[in-house]
Every structure is written in structure tokens, then in C-alpha cells.
Image: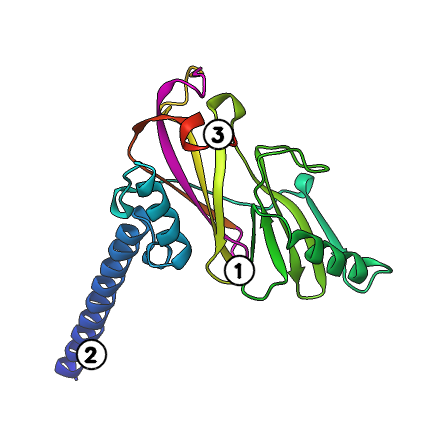
Amino acid sequence: MIKKLISIILTILIFALVSLTVFLNYRQQFSIDRSKLPSKVEASEGFQKWITNLRNKGIKLEADEFRLLEENEIYNTKWLKIYSIDAPGIKDTFEKTLKDQHVVKQSAFSPSEREFIDYRHEQREDFLPNEIRYYGRMDDNVLDARLLNCDVSANCYFDRAYFLSNELFVVSEFVLNNPLNKDKIICDIAVKCEYVVKIHVVDLINNSRLVYVSKPFNLVLSEAIPNF
């Protein structure tokens, strides 16, 4: 009886030890993966086109040099409007908004063509040049939201956006390098200054935004982005 009891206890302990080891290995692997730019971003057509275009301009960035900077939630009731698709006039407004947006160059549509990101560096109705607009349908609702903004005083510029799926999209941002976020760095866009690129990976379903940052590099922003 005692031997049987000891055998059962040992079996339970071994099982618990194995389970703990698997969990710790998974957590460590998950942590490592999150510290670097996700492979699904790096392998995407949108990222490859973007980074190739930068290299053609003399801006040499490598995907494996990006590191996780921070994680934030994306939805804020102050900047989010939700409309029922069944409310009077909402469906017509939704269809017209999608149609009008197709002629806008600095916008990206989801694979379903039912959502878009507007990242134009200009004033757009209720959106400032340093704000990203998300517009789209989720289930029976239409969402209109300011999901991202950046620091104008730091010469920030959203230069590209693209969807990885209907629920996941990426936005790249140029901004002056200020790792300690202490004193404001002032630099004219026509002068060579130290910049970084931030990659914002936005998950609409999980209300998450992972921000990855590149190594700093010198750049004359007005030359790299003539329409700034």
C-alpha cells in the first residue's frame, strides 16, 4: 500500500515537473519572439516593399535590428465612434466612405475591403496630420477611430500602412531619436538629424499595439520624404 502511494506521488511530481518545464520553455520562447519584430510582419509583402523602398533611398534598415519598445491598448472611448450598421443611413454612409477612400493614395485596405487605414499627413475633417484614422465594419457595427497619433514636435511622420489580415495591421513612423523622452529635441526637417523608425503592430481583436523601434540613423527628413 505504501509502495503504491509513493509510486503515485512520484508520478504526480514527475508530471508536475515536466509540465512546469514545458511552461517555462514556452514562456521564454514567447518572450524572445515578442522582443523582436514578428516573423509574420517581416515576411509580409507590405514590409518587404517598404524596406526595399527605403534601401533604394539610401536608408539601410534590417528587420532583425528592430526591438520591442512598448505595448499599449488601442481603443479609447474619447477617440472612438461606434455606429450600428442597422441604424438609419449608416449602411449607405459606410459604403460611400469606402468608395471615396479608394481614390486616396495614402490609405490601406484590409483583405476584406471593409476596413481602411488613412495615414495622410494632412488635416482630414476631425483628424490631424499626426493622427491615424481607422474606419471599418466589425460584425454589426461600424467603427471610426483615431488609433494612433505621434509627436509633431519630434518631426513624426507616418509613411506607410498595410494589413496583414482583417484584424491585424502595421504602421511605420519616422521620428527624431529621443530614447529617454526627457527634453524635447528640436531639429529642422531640412537639417541632418538622428532619427529612428517605429513599427506599430496593431491587433484590433486583442486591443493591442506593439511598438518596435529601429537603431538610430542620420537623415535629412525633407530629402527622404519630399512631401512632408
Gap in Å between the C-alphas at discs 2 and 3? Answer: 62 Å
Q: Amino acid at mark 3?
A: Cys
Most foreground residue, 49 or 91 = 49
Label 2 or label 1, whichever lies nearer to me, is 1
Gap in Å between the C-alphas at discs 2 and 1? Answer: 47 Å
Q: Which residue is identified by label 3?
A: 156
Q: Quadrant of residue 179?
A: top left
Q: Is residue 148 above or below residue 41?
A: above
Left or right, residue 141 beside residue 29: right
Tell me if I can see residue 50 in this picture: yes
Give x and y (percent) for residue 110. Answer: 55, 60
For numbered disc 2, what is the local secondary structure? helix
Q: Residues within 10 Å of mark 2 (few under 14, many from 20)?
A: few
Give x and y (percent) for residue 157. Answer: 49, 33
Check if mark 2's residue and mark 1's residue have beta carbons within 8 Å. no
Residue 167 image label:
1
Mark 2 or mark 3, which has the lower sequence index?
Answer: 2
For numbered disc 1, what is the local secondary structure? loop
Mark 1 or mark 3, which has the lower sequence index?
Answer: 3
Label 2 or label 3, whichever lies nearer to me, is 3
Residue at the spot 33% in from the left edge and 54% down from the top edge: 42
Q: Residues within 10 Å of mark 1 (few under 14, many from 20)?
A: some
Q: Which residue is identified by label 2?
A: 8
Give x and y (percent) for residue 131. Answer: 59, 36
Tell me if I can see residue 67 in this picture: no
- The quadrant the N terminus occupies is bottom left
